[in-house]
Amino acid sequence: MTFKKTYEMYFANKRLNIIFFSIFIIIFFIIIYLLFLRKYHLEYQVLNSDRYKNKVNLFKIKNIYKSSSLILGDSRFEGLKTNLTNEINLSIGGETSKTMFDRIKSYEFRDSIKIILGIGLNDVLFSYKTKDIRHNIARLIYQISSKTNNSEIYLCKILPINSSGFFYNKLDVNSKIRNLNLYFDSIHINSNNNKKKLIDFQEFTNNSNELKFRYSYDGIHLNENGLNLFNKRINLFLKDEE
């Protein structure tokens, strides 16, 4: 083998090693992002969006303490309107149980009110581990219960997604949602004489336990038909509880 061929093979192998090493570094950082950083990055984007900031500022001028019914939720609950009197909808799209916990720290609630709580979907979509979601939701419910006495907290089970949409790790999303909904059954509220009541949405799911696509325009968010049924379901539940 001539010196020239040896020289060319050496540098060819060196370039190949550099390429493989670069690919390894890229894959390593992708794994680190997906496992540890993705949820914080997505929450940061939500918290720093103009839409989120504008809603937070809007809620600051509302007299939350005088309201006898509150809605706390994510984007699926932004369009919710119930037949309850003196209602304030404090829902914001992109909300997780962690960001809601931080946001409502300064809110003051009156006693003997109705609180509709719909949270958890974005926790799953943002890749939080199930045990962390459970911890954050339990902490959030305890925080809400500590702000009021003799109130009813309506905990809404999480609607699944339709996996035909484009989502990260979509096959695992509905499995996590089912586990969280089972966890909701076991939650107990033992403070300030408040009561937990569960609202489920079985009519929204198909035989595969996915969100029926006719109720959504993207596999997650509700379309007009979905929102109408969503409002009807919650209002019927509230009426039955009277």
Image (cartoon, rainbow, N blue to C red):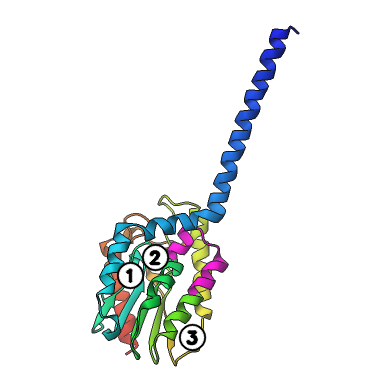
Q: What residue is shown at x 62% (from left), y 24% (from top)?
A: 15
The residues tagged by marks 3 and 2 sit, at their Cα atoms, a distance apart of 23 Å
Chain part drawn in magenta: 121-137
Q: Quadrant of residue 160?
A: bottom left
| Residue 199 seen in render | no
| Residue 178 seen in render | yes
State the residue position of label 1.
Answer: 91
Identify the mark at residue 123; answer none if there is no mark.
Answer: none
Q: Is residue 213 magenta?
A: no
Instruction: Measuring from the top left, give residue 7's x and y in whole percent.
Output: 69, 13
Q: Amino acid at mark 3?
A: Ile
State the residue position of label 3.
Answer: 189
Q: Amino acid at mark 1?
A: Ser
Q: Nearer the viewer, residue 187 or 216?
A: 187
In the visual, does 26 lie left or right of 156? Answer: right
Q: Nearer the viewer, residue 188 or 65?
A: 65
State the residue lying farthest toward the right.
Answer: 1
Q: Amino acid at mark 2?
A: Glu
Instruction: Measuring from the top left, give residue 101's x and y in whole percent.
Output: 43, 72
Instruction: Measuring from the top left, give residue 126's x and y in whole percent.
Output: 47, 58
Q: Residues within 10 Å of mark 3 (few under 14, many from 20)?
A: some
Q: Residues within 10 Å of mark 1 (few under 14, many from 20)?
A: many
The residues tagged by marks 1 and 2 sit, at their Cα atoms, a distance apart of 8 Å
Identify the mark at residue 95; answer none if there is no mark.
Answer: 2
Q: Nearer the viewer, residue 231 or 195?
A: 195
State the residue lying farthest toward the top.
Answer: 2
Secondary structure under tag 3 reads loop
Of callouts 3 and 2, the N-terminal one: 2
Q: Is residue 136 magenta?
A: yes
Which of labels 3 and 2 is toward the front? 2
Circles 1 and 2, Cβ within 8 Å, touching? The answer is yes
